[in-house]
Structure formats: C-alpha cells, structure tokens
Image (cartoon, rainbow, N blue to C red):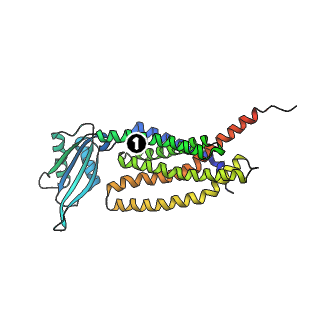
Amino acid sequence: MMDIMGKRNYCFVLSGLILLACIIGYFVNGLQLDIQFQGGTIMQIEMPDGNFSADRAAAIVMDAIGKKATVQKSKTYDAKAGTTSLNLLVLNIASENPINEAERTSVLNAVKKEFNLKDIPKATVNSVEPFIGNEVKVKSLYAIFWASILIILYVWFRFRTMHGLSAGVFAVLALFHDVMVMFAVYILLKIPINDSFIAAVLTIIGYSINDTVVIYDRIRENTKLMRKASIYELVNTSVVQTLNRSINTSVTTLISILTLLVFAYIYNIQSIIEFALPMTVGIVSGVYSTIFISSPLYLVWQERKLRKKTSHKPVKA
C-alpha cells in the first residue's frame, strides 16, 4: 500500500513555498484589482475592422499614460442586416480616479499611430466608481467567513466520533490553502482580481470541502473496521482507498473546465477566461490539499494528542 502520509513533510514544505511566493509576489507586484473593485474608466473605441491586437493595445495604454488596462475585442451586430456594425476596442483602465481629457487624447493618438488609422478614432468614455466593487468585496469576505464557520460546525457534528472539531478546522485550513494558491497565481502573473475571481473562490471552497468530507467519512468507517490499527495506518489507508475517487472526479471536472478555457482563449471571450482560469487552478489545488494537507494535518494533531496522553500516564511500579 502507498505510504502517502509518509510524504506529508514534503507536502507541507511545498505549501509553505507557495505561501512564501504569494507573500513575496504581493510585495513585489502588488495586488492588481480590476476596474470593478478599483474604479477607473471604460473606453470603447471604434475600429475600422477587427484586425487589431488586444495584447498590443494594453501595452500602448501603459506607454501612453502609465496605467494598466485590460482589453477586449468586441463587435456590435445589425440584427436586420445580419452583419457586423462596429468593431470595438474596449479598454478597462483601472485607477483611483477616472482619466482626464489629456490622457484620453493620448490614448486615442497612441491607438491611431499603432494601428495606422487615418483619423483619430471615435470613442465612448464612461467613468466607473468602485462603490459596487467595495460592496462585493465586503460581502464576499463575510460569505467566506460564515461559510468557514458553518463548515467547521457541520464537520464537528458529523464526525464527532473522530474528534470532529479538529477535523473541521483542518478542512477549513485546506480551503484557505486553495485560496492562497489561487491568489499566488494571480499575483505572480499580474492578473487583475475581479468579481469572477470571487465567484471562482466560493465555488472551489464548496468543491474542495466535498472531497475532504469523503475522506473523513472513510476514516470514520475504518475506525470501526480497523480497531487495532494505529492512527497513522487508519488515516493512510483511508486516503489511499479514496484516492482513485478523488483523482477521477477532479480530472473529469478539470477536462470540462480546460475545454471551456481553451475555447474562451481561441475566441477571446474574456468573461469566460476570467472565471475558468481560477477554477482550473482551484481544482488542481483542491485535490492536492484534500489528500496532502487536511488529512496529514489531522494525523499530526491526533498523533500529538496521543503522545501527550501517553506521557501523562502514571508509570506502574
């Protein structure tokens, strides 16, 4: 039988390195917030055709006014004629204050020069206040907090025969591990965090805890079947028995999400990319934390309690 629990220290070190990378990345790159959370300006620039690069547009905005922009290519359609009416270059420029008239002119001139346009393109400019974003952030934090409390209470009651309080706490720690991994990827790649990221985080929390509960359920069942086994054998056997189920379920889900992500990249559907990318990272992290974080932490805690209990027993003469 595989000795998964014997590798737990390596897994703890790996998770520690990921956390360290997240902290270092935060101080080096900062946390990039999308326009919904930070506020800023949305510019919809009319283009003569669809032959322009969204990636290059983001670079010229940075060069022109020194502000980061997320870029989308968009089209409007004439329903009656069944043809494309306008090709739009959509710039979401996140900043504490909306861009001024001089910055707007600089962006339009840069677009004209970069894409060899005859005239300065027409643009619709809208300012975005961060009030909705702030409200979403606060409510999301509340949702994560109360979800964590309810998960601990549920696991505590459901698995009280196997010291459910510690099991619930370590299950939630594994969930925070998944969230930190998702943050690390976004910080290191300088991807702006938006409402799609928050939705993906809440989805992964529900997905990951489901796998953890399956393992806990097997530990509880094996407690009755393996009465003479040590806590190490009990946890390791339970994890191995559920390993195929955890991996197969995650791989199946991952195939669907990756297909969606590839499709979105091919057709440049930014809203789907913003949801599918953190979901992909979260699913991989979720199956990892279920097997290599929550269960090993539970094992380490129970072994520590047994050692303390044994050390306090009186020695017979």
Residue 208 at x, y percent in the picture: 51, 51
Which residue is drawn at the image coordinates 24% and 46% (left, top)? 61
| Total marks placed | 1
**Dot 1: what SS?**
helix
Residue 9: name its quadrant: top right
Identified at 60% across, 52% down, the residue is 215
Q: Which residue occupies the foreground of this view, 149 or 73?
A: 149
According to the picture, the residue beneath numbered tag 1 turns out to be: 140
User: Residue lying farthest left?
Assistant: 119
Spot occupied by residue 267 in the image (x, y as percentages of width and height): 32, 62
From the viewer's perspective, is residue 155 above or below residue 75? Answer: above
Name the quadrant containing residue 280: bottom left
- Counting from the top left corner in percent of width and height, residue 37 is at 32, 41
Q: Residue furthest bottom?
A: 81
Left or right of residue 74, residue 33 in this image: right
Q: Please state, as top left, top right, bottom left or bottom right, where the N terminus lies in the image.
A: bottom right
The amino acid pointed to by label 1 is Ser
